[in-house]
Amino acid sequence: MMIEMKEEDFIVSKTDLKGRLTYVNKIFMEMAGYTEEELLGKPHNIIRHPDMPKAVFKQLWDMVQNGEEIFAFVVNKTKNGDDYWVYANVTPSYDVNNRIIGYYSVRRKPNNKALEVIKPLYAQMLSAEKSGGVKAGVELLNNILHEKGVSYNELIIDIQG
């Protein structure tokens, strides 16, 4: 079953450098169907949906580990197997010496028109990944970005509107 975020909802989480959850807000727990105890210390990918292209997560990790913020559309899976889409913004967190110490993510409801564009793109990427691995998904995404003459974030922000 598909769950839809409310317009006013913001899902917030923080992770350490390895992607293990160090903070989750109440809406994160409600949407994902887990308790705080079930989430803290666990990999953020506890909510990863199998329909999510690995190439998007590669893009995400490459950018945030390089100190850049990223925007992305993500379909997540709840504890009981339901799905929910989010429009995510992920940024690095820094210590006083300007070293990355973790990651901060805020998710909100995606624009339905954006999902009409993203869902077929992700289906293409998944198909490419099934035959050629993550590299094929990345290549497909990079070709689309090159054709449109935009960066990854520019594409995602433009689609969200």
Image: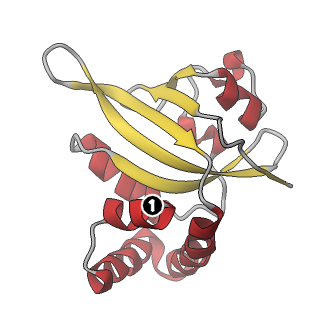
- Kind of residue at badge 1: Val
**Residue 156 or 125: which is nearer the viewer?**
156
- Residue 113's x, y, as percent? 61, 69
Q: Tell me the residue at 27%/73% (across/down).
A: 150
Residue 80: name its quadrant.
Answer: top right
Dot 1, crowdedness within 10 Å: few (<14), some or many (≥20)? many
In the image, residue 70 sits, relative to residue 18, either above or below, namely below
Q: Name the element at disc 1.
A: helix
Numbered-mark total = 1
**Residue 161 or 64: which is nearer the viewer?**
161
- Residue 11's x, y, as percent? 59, 33
Q: Is residue 126 left or right of residue 57?
A: right
In the image, residue 56 sits, relative to residue 31, either above or below, namely below
Residue 39: name its quadrant.
Answer: top right
Q: Is residue 84 left or right of residue 155?
A: right
Rendering colour mode = secondary structure
Q: Tell me the residue at 17%/13% (across/down).
A: 96
Q: Tell me the residue at 28%/50% (across/down).
A: 63
Pick out the residue farthest to the left.
97
- Residue 129's x, y, as percent? 51, 75
Quadrant location of the N terminus? Answer: bottom right
Q: Tell me the residue at 68%/28% (across/down).
A: 27
Query: According to the image, label 1 marks what residue?
Result: 56
Q: Is residue 60 left or right of residue 88?
A: left
Pick out the residue farthest to the bottom.
147
**Residue 113 or 99: which is nearer the viewer?**
113
In the image, residue 68 sits, relative to residue 35, either above or below, namely below
- Residue 85's x, y, as percent? 65, 53
